[in-house]
Image (cartoon, rainbow, N blue to C red):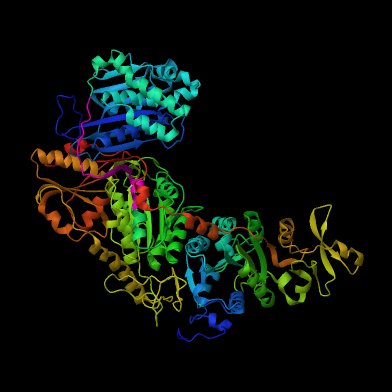
Amino acid sequence: MGHSSSKINENNVEDDWSNTVRFAGDSGDGMQLTGGRLTFEAAISGMGLATFPDYPAEIRAPAGTTFGVSSFQVRFGEGLIASSGDHADILVAMNPAALKVNIKEVIPGGLIIIDSSSFTDRGIKKAGYDENPLTNNSLSGLQLISADISHLTIEAVKEFGLGNKDGLRCRNMWTLGLILWIFSKSVNETTNWLEGKFGKDSILTKANIAALNAGHSYAENTEVSEDIIRKVIPITKPTPGKWKAITGAESLAFGLAIGANKAKINMTLCSYPITPASPIMHYLANYQLEGIGIFQAEDEIAACCSAIGVSYAGGLGVTSSSGPGISLKAEAIGLAVSVELPLIIINSQRAGPSTGLPTRAEQSDLMQAIYGRHGEAPLVVLAPKSPSHCFEIGQQAVRIAIKYMTPVMILSDAYLTNASEPWLIPDTSKIKESPVSFGKTQENYMPFERDPKTLARKWVKPGTEGMEHRIGGLEKDSLTGNISYDPDNHASMTDLRKQKVQKVQKELSDIVITGPKNGDILIIGWGSTNGPISEAQNTLSKSGMKIAHIQLSCLWPLAESLKNIVTQYNHIVIVEMNDGQLFNLLRVEIAPNAKSITQVSGKPFRVVDLIEKFKTLNK
Amino acid sequence: MGINEKPSQLKPADYASDQEVRWCPGCGDYAILNAVKRTLADSQADKKNTVFVSGIGCSSRLPYYMSTYGFHTIHGRAPAFATGIKITNPELDVWIITGDGDSLSIGGNHYIHILRRNLNCQILLFNNEIYGLTKGQASPASRTGTVSPTTPQGSIEAPLSACEVALSAGATFVARGVDTAIKQLVPTLSEAKKHIGTSLVEIYQNCIVYNDDVFKSFTDKSVAMEKQIHLEDGQPMLFGEEKLKGLAINKDYSALEIIDLKKNPEAISNILMHNKKNKTIAYLLSQMDQKTMPVALGVIYCVEKPTLDSNYTKKLNSQKNNIRKIMEKGQTWTI
């Protein structure tokens, strides 16, 4: 079974197996980096993998406190690896607080690795424990490696003259060394990486390598090795080519950039810093791509307005944010709907309302995306289902925005933005070019005359001779674009804007159904829930249930074909990380008898929970 | 006019659209609209490369009345739209049309930041010290005591000065004009158009319906000569019917004071010469109390600084990375 732990040794490698390792420590302990390294080690062996960085909103919360704990979970293996794992097989806890926060995530019989030096009376108290969790039987049923990692690290790096503070920074490499040993991996890849990152001769490199080696050989030289079953990461052969682990933020940045590139226009990402959306702006700022700029605006509203200005002038305006920022942009998005200009809005959803849980994922902005503007202001809403899918959705958003002269909202979330998975780097030369055809000088130009096929108006850039015209947020005459307060004209413009967005259905490829074309249960999900839903569906299919799965990637307009599809199953169940927003929408539009499975903990669904719920449903 | 028959010389009327102007009869906006058209005609501005961008309010309807490109946007945000436009096509000559409510209240943030960034464009801030389009509420530019539907007992707030805020925000061009004083306004607008950077022109505009005669104390013909000083770079700051009054620095108070040259002819050497690059004097000029001092009009301050749009374009042109190349960067593995 894909989602849970299987003990692996050299003589017993199952077909379908996975391992989940969770690294946890203070925000400054380097857990994200350590997790990233293990991810890479798994990736180069050809493993399927999924990661889940989980960090607090505070940058460096007081050390040793539960609210300062940052963690990184990586799951890798063979078979379907679409979610980052329900439970950890191995937990690395750098202090008592990290243990306290994450102990419930560990599977029975799992392995816990702790730095014993942090389990002082003070540290234990700071984490909110009444007594030492290592000695009160609270870890019974679990395996424990308790090592004085701090001391051992300092000993290992002593010769490089690093002080205690700098020396302790290498603790994460010591830990990584131990983990690599457990998975029967050498330290070579990480050694090369450290040398590449800090320079071969740097003290930092040498100290980190020393710590890494010390951690690696620790188990070998102590009794630990007798208790721990070492695991082997077998080498598998996925599609040949060049791969990298990619996060949703990077993938989306690439997708948009290649979209603009193929449309032969410049793009500007106009944004304002907000968690968890900022990485998209950071990546694009760093890439220094030809024709792709960024503009950091003074606020969310200005970010959206300047993006619309970019599109008005003939570039591709993109703005990215998260819930609170999207609320602020709403009025400007309405203007883009009204003046019918291309615009891409990315919402990396976080848990709300208000400031909510800034670093946690939720899908509670769906209704806002579809309906969250004053007036009848329809736009296109797309949702990527995995980090690599962000690349496709980014391109699709660009194509639709330009072809239909419409704003397109991309609903990502905190999980997708930061989570990573292996990505076969695509051959971008094979992606079709479709240069924008801007309106050229013509007699009797009517700014709101439409292409009958798409209902899109022409995109005429300022600078075009003889085509001077005025647009604005006041209602416009359906041809001339002049201000019109005529009641019939307003009714007809409202309908045209709606019909135009509905036409986008033509752009959508057929809905993909995983599983039987008819049967007991059809699960409908959207966005980042794809991982756990796919695995639950896969497991239940194997056990004989007639269960199918659709992950919608276009939430508005809804595909016409859905209406027929849903009639083929006994139960329709909508799974989402909110209080039932897609459920409510589909109940009205598509499936009146649908059922709803929701979760609003800020965390991804667990596969086991979904399996239980689907089973209950089918009783 | 067909697109192929291009007249050799564009007249102000050629910059008018076919739309009927819908401001109240007697509104100061008519005069400003005329001044704008004359300014464009004076420089034979290319219509296809001229864009008027506005927010919301009476003034912000102006783009509809021009035969250039125009974008009537949302309340207070015209500077943000203009920024997107200019970084995408710096060749366009962008005019932001705004009012005191639009710029100093709901759009205060954008007002500060466009000036800080020095986007190469013109901002014409129609200041009538009132919300006209919403029927006459007090604005942040309204004087303390202004009676309006929201302040029936008189405003209890202090007003904000558009020029002082602009100078503090790092403006590179600050000027003032009066709606009906078209003779002075047109040259000021021409200077604004020529300036490379954000050119702020605050235009005192009379709202005949909701705030009539609010500027009468210095715009009325009977007092204009005594209550206005028209600044010219490199010229002494003289005003009055016979140009026998001047401005000097009172050294005790570090403030401007009026010198009466009739009474005190030898004080002519104390009269300040206008230097549009002097920011300290620019502050003092824009701060002058309308009750006791003349109102400074014309170009108060003007310096050259790099603009956002040219810096952005330079940066973008220097970016040469190919997407495929960047995709392949970082931790990759080949199978």
State which region is magenta. A231-254
Q: Is residue A617 magenta?
A: no
Please indicate whether residue B270 sits to the left or right of residue B6 in the image: right
Q: Residue at x 66, y 77 (%)?
A: B182
The residue lying toward the viewer, choosing from B178 and B267, is B267
Q: Is residue A245 magenta?
A: yes
In the image, residue A225 lies at what x, y percent? 26, 16
Q: Is residue A441 above or below residue A542?
A: below
Q: Is residue A78 above or below residue B246?
A: above
In the image, residue B92 lies at what x, y percent? 51, 69
The residue lying toward the viewer, choosing from A152 and B160, is A152
Q: Is residue A458 above or below residue A330?
A: below
The residue lying toward the viewer, choosing from A383 and A608, is A383
In the image, residue A24 lies at what x, y percent? 36, 28
**From the image, which quarter does the C terminus of chain A lie in?**
top left
The residue lying toward the viewer, choosing from B100 and A394, is A394
Please indicate whether residue A122 sits to the left or right of residue A40 in the image: right
The answer to whether residue A119 is seen in the rendering is no
Q: Is residue A140 above or below residue A580?
A: above
